[in-house]
Image: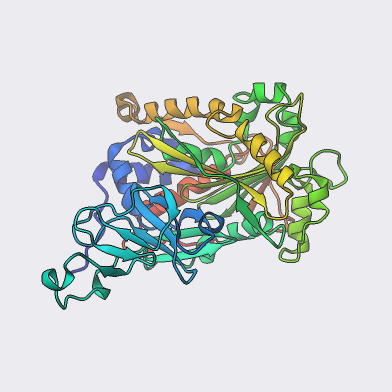
Amino acid sequence: MTAIREPSLSPRVRTLMDRIESGLPEGRIPASIFGNAEVHQAELRKIFGRAWVYMAHESEIEANGDYVVRRIGEDSFVVTRDENGDIHVLFDACKHRGVQICRADSGNTSHFRCPYHGWTYSSDGSLVGAPLWKNAFGTMSKADNGLAKAAQVESFHGLIFATLDPGAPPLREYLGGMAWYMDLLFGLDKDGVEVLGKPQRFVLDANWKSGADNFSGDDYHLGTLHKSVYAIGAFPVPFSENMMGYHIQASPGHSLSFSMAEDADEPGPKFFGFPESLAENFDTANISGHQLEVARRSRVFVGNVFPNFSILALPMTEDGATHAPTGVLTVRCWQPKGPGQVEMWNWFLGYKNMTPEQKDRAYRAGLGTFSLGGAFEMDDTEPWITVGRTGRSVAAELLDFELNYEMGMPGVGMAHPVQDWPGPGKVYWTRYEEGVQRNMYAYYADLMRAEPGQWPEHEF
């Protein structure tokens, strides 16, 4: 059988990717990448068909037989823990006629049965039988007709990732320097984290890249778009002070931002706002002294693992008059649903050794701020809708309309490179800087233009 090669980019998409490469040195990105239908179709193959994509947390499928249904790009996959405790990411399509085999978002089962002809699969994806097997199929191999699986599956601090590309680099290699920062956050306590409640899901008329762009480190919008949140005391640090910190291009594609005290003795939140009683008892045996010091000084961690997995840890409260801010840890995926829509999946996590009261308080604080009905979410989503509208516009295409990403470039603003940072990556102080987003788009354009079997260089 002849191997199927990935389709080449259309002339229009190739031109837009070339414009990213030529425009980034001057801080320019074509607006049409946020809505062009040809770009979207290319992304499903070139980005989501190759990159490591977040699927679930192990605590969501804790028992043998547990499963959840998730997506890679626009395609449905079932994440299962089989009867031996192993994790699988199974394409949600019967091998017989391609019918969807899982009809619930989550649950526990030993088998999946196709409703069309009754083909039945075990929780590891193996075909175990079908009605009237002897008459219908006789000696046909069951082993050759199991459910299709993601090419590679790996777990990192309980975070399950998968890729459809058998030639993709191992997950830790793919993460590069970002792994150091994820170790810092998710490994801050040796017992790790767990999911608090089911994921929230809601659909926006926006493009998935707007969310990834924002969480790569768009801190500049905090003083304008979220001004009311500061006014009601939902976040305990004034805007000007919150902008003091670091922007880090951890590795190609992956970026993050820390709001951080210059000195660990400064007043204000430490350890992302988690209670002192919890922080004092963190078992930090799995992280280095440098990582511990960064966590101790940190108020906010916000970052994006390319392409669409975002992380946020910070002190929040849904009601400043009643409850003091507490540490909230949320992760989210920006799932594409066509060029003009994104489905946002949002999980709240807590450290396993938190008390039930601490977990409840963190969960409620998160719901009131970073959720479908949260103050931050309602602020963010409206501008992203209009970004997508601009990206789909005829005017943006005909005018070759470009967006400004110059902040932090030489001679633009107050940010400057930092040489003595203890972790990996390109680092800038302060957070008035957009190199973190330029890093995302540079890798995006490189991966979009990469030939089959080739990966962009993963070194700075």
Q: Can residue 26 be seen in this view?
A: no
Residue at (34% x, 41% y) in the render: 16
**Left or right: 321 in relation to 1:** right
Residue sitting at the far left: 135
In the figure, 117 relative to 318: above or below? below
Residue 88 percent location from the top left of the image: 42, 64
In the figure, 14 relative to 268: above or below? below
Residue at (69% x, 58% y) in the render: 423
Q: Nearer the viewer, residue 206 or 57?
A: 57
Colour scheme of this structure image? rainbow
Q: Nearer the viewer, residue 265 or 364?
A: 364
Residue 242 percent location from the top left of the image: 72, 35
Residue sitting at the far right: 265
Q: Is residue 115 visible?
A: yes
**Number of numbered discs present?**
0
Q: Give residue 188's quadrant in the image.
A: bottom right
In the figure, 303 relative to 189: above or below? above
**Left or right: 261 in relation to 371:** right
The C terminus is located in which quarter?
Answer: bottom right
**Left or right: 36 in relation to 345:** left
The N terminus is located in which quarter?
Answer: bottom left
Q: Give residue 325's quadrant in the image.
A: top right
Q: Which of 420 and 263 is in front in this view?
A: 263
Residue 21 percent location from the top left of the image: 42, 47
Residue sitting at the far front: 132
Residue 25 percent location from the top left of the image: 49, 44
